[in-house]
Image (cartoon, rainbow, N blue to C red):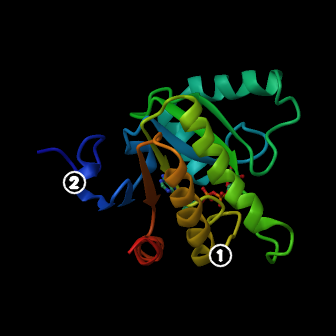
Amino acid sequence: MPTASTPTTWRTEAKSFGRLLLYRGDITRIDTDAVVNAANSSLLGGGGVDGAIHRAGGPEILEACRRLRAGYYGKGLRTGEAVITTGGRLPARHVVHTVGPVWNGGHKQEPELLANCYRNSLRLATENQLRSIAFPGISTGVYGYPKAEATAIAVREVRAFLEQHDLPQEVVFVTFDEASFQLYERELE
Ligand code: APR
């Protein structure tokens, strides 16, 4: 009897809204072509979803991030930007690392920077011919972005991007708690 949220059964638990899916669970169990990591600018790991992805994905991901840091991203990844690496041992082939804005009252370009996280992650998915990509709630944990506003930006930006692009074919919003799930459900319905 497969346990819940194994790489293949998550789809039966996800709610479908056309090319957008909504799922409540652990993003490290999702077998989309890529999963997005809510990273920090060091790209060298952290807590939250960053910690979960590195723990489940293994050292290959960190090694790939270190190579990025040794090269073009010597000073780290700027807020709103995104890079792609191997998914290591994850069910997902790739990880797209993006750095969300730390919430600072909303008058320091946070909305624009958060929107850039989604746009730049999706741009990488298109450039790499990925069919599917899964997003956590970027910035809505440690970075303190109010969940309702962050969810509205996430859904708006993904919808706008998919209207202009055939790839990725599918985008999955992965929420970790019921409150977030309901916020996405309200935005998507
Ligand atoms: N799967 C899906 N979602 C998760 C998981 C998981 N395994 N773990 C946490 N989340 C959710 C959180 O509940 C939150 O809604 O991901 C969202 C983002 O939370 P954080 O991981 O704290 O990310 P963020 O708020 O963007 O802060 C980034 O935290 O972990 C550090 O290194 C990271 O410094 C960076 C900062």
Q: Residue at x 62, y 44 (%)?
A: 121
Could you tell me which secondary element the residue under label 2 belongs to? helix
* Mark 1 Cβ and ligand 1 under 8 Å apart: no
124 w.r.t. 4: above or below: above
Residue 67 showing in the rendered view: yes
The residue that label 1 is drawn on is: 146
**Alpha carbon of mark 1 to alpha carbon of mark 2: how far?**
29 Å
Front residue (pair 112, 141): 112
First in sequence, mark 1 or 2: give its number.
Answer: 2
- Give the number of marks: 2
Q: Amino acid at mark 2?
A: Thr
Could you tell me which secondary element the residue under label 1 belongs to? loop
Query: Ligand 1, what quadrant?
Result: bottom right
Judged left or right of residue 13, residue 134 is right
The residue that label 2 is drawn on is: 12
State the image coordinates of residue 49 (x, y, percent, origin top left).
Answer: 56, 51
* Mark 2 Cβ and ligand 1 under 8 Å apart: no
Q: Residue at x 72, y 38 (%)?
A: 43
Q: Residue at x 25, y 41 (%)?
A: 8
Q: Quadrant of the N terminus?
A: top left
Q: Residue at x 86, y 29 (%)?
A: 74
